[in-house]
Image (cartoon, rainbow, N blue to C red):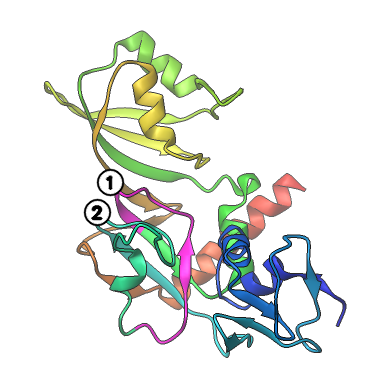
Amino acid sequence: MPEERLQKILSRAGVASRRQAEQLMVEGRVTVNGKAVTELGAKADVERDHVKVDGRRLRQPRRFVYLAFHKPRGCVTTLRDPQGRPTVMEFLHGAKARVYPVGRLDYASEGLLLFTNDGDFANLLTAASSHVPKTYLVKVTGLLSPEQEQQFRRGIPLEGRGTAPAGLRLVRRGENPWYEVRLIEGRKNQIRIMFKHFGRLVEKLKRVRIGFLELGALKPGKWRPLAPGEVERFRTLLQSKAGRSS
């Protein structure tokens, strides 16, 4: 088998996403043939080399696992946190495989988050080109004007380039109204930054849907396996989007 980048090997083996794999390498937690590898361009042959993470030999998963999880507020979407804050991994007791989060929700946000040990599935779902819509309920400090709503939908400047067109719908009026926001991209703290652009702060943020999959009645801190039909529906969705972008 030809050599591949370690990030790709770790991702395919279900250890972490490629971005998270890079962090594991930087922290010196990945070894190849007994030597720590911190260079992000490093390669290995998983069939020939002994690749370990935290001292555990890397092995391809016997079966793929896909979970839907209701992330509560007050925890971080990482495998571990240097600041000692709770992580989402602490809620996955009983999962029958070593899985990792697909994408992220920030510390103060809650809602639907997927976990898997299928690296190819995770990479397709988080790729910018996939454009899988994600839907959020957001409570903010004040109504947007009709003009601001239109600008929000068209996009705002963010780190040198505009945000992609977004869906926005007022779902509850009031001094602190609720909006439904639909994004096809997931830049860091994007929704909070977009509302702040118009002088509004986000008080609560909850992701309620990824693609077709709804959070539903899943309680905070709880998870469930995806049904085979749900996994297949995701695969069909991702393949169709990959075909349109190629």
Residue 230 to residue 143: above or below: below
> Of the residues shown, which amino acid type is indicated by label 2?
Gly
Residue 212 lies left or right of residue 204; in this view the side is: right
Q: Does the magenta run of residues contain 166?
A: no
For the magenta stretch, what is the residue range? Answer: 95-112
Indicate left or right for 19 with 169 as reference: right
Query: Considering the numbered disc 1 on the image, is that residue within a helix, a strand or a loop?
Result: loop
Find the residue positioned furthest to the left: 175
| Label number found at residue 39 | none
Nearer the observer, 171 or 129: 129
Q: Which numbered disc covers residue 108? A: 1
For marks 2 and 1, the one nearer the N-term is 2
Quadrant assignment for the N terminus: bottom right
The residue carrying mark 2 is 74
Q: Give residue 26's position: percent from left, percent from top.
A: 62, 62
Q: CA distance from mark 2 to mark 1?
A: 6 Å
- Rendering coords of residue 90 (x, y %): 31, 72
Residue 207 at x, y percent in the picture: 33, 48
Looking at the picture, tell me which residue is in the foreground, 189 or 182: 189
Q: Residue at x 43, y 53 (%)?
A: 104
Q: Main secondary structure of the magenta part?
A: loop
Decide which of 110, 136 is in the foreground and name it: 110
Counting other residues with Cα less than 10 Å from the Cα at mark 2, is it few (<14), some (14-19), or many (20 or more)?
A: some
Q: Residue at x 42, y 63 (%)?
A: 114
Quarter where residue 135 is shown: top left
Residues under numbered marks 2 and 1 in contact, where contact means CB atoms less than 8 Å apart: yes
Residue at image position (45%, 64%) is 101
Three-letter amino acid code at the position of disc 1: Ala
Query: Tag 1: Cα neighbours inside 10 Å, few (<14), some, or many (≥20)?
Result: some
Residue drawn at (36%, 70%) of the image = 89
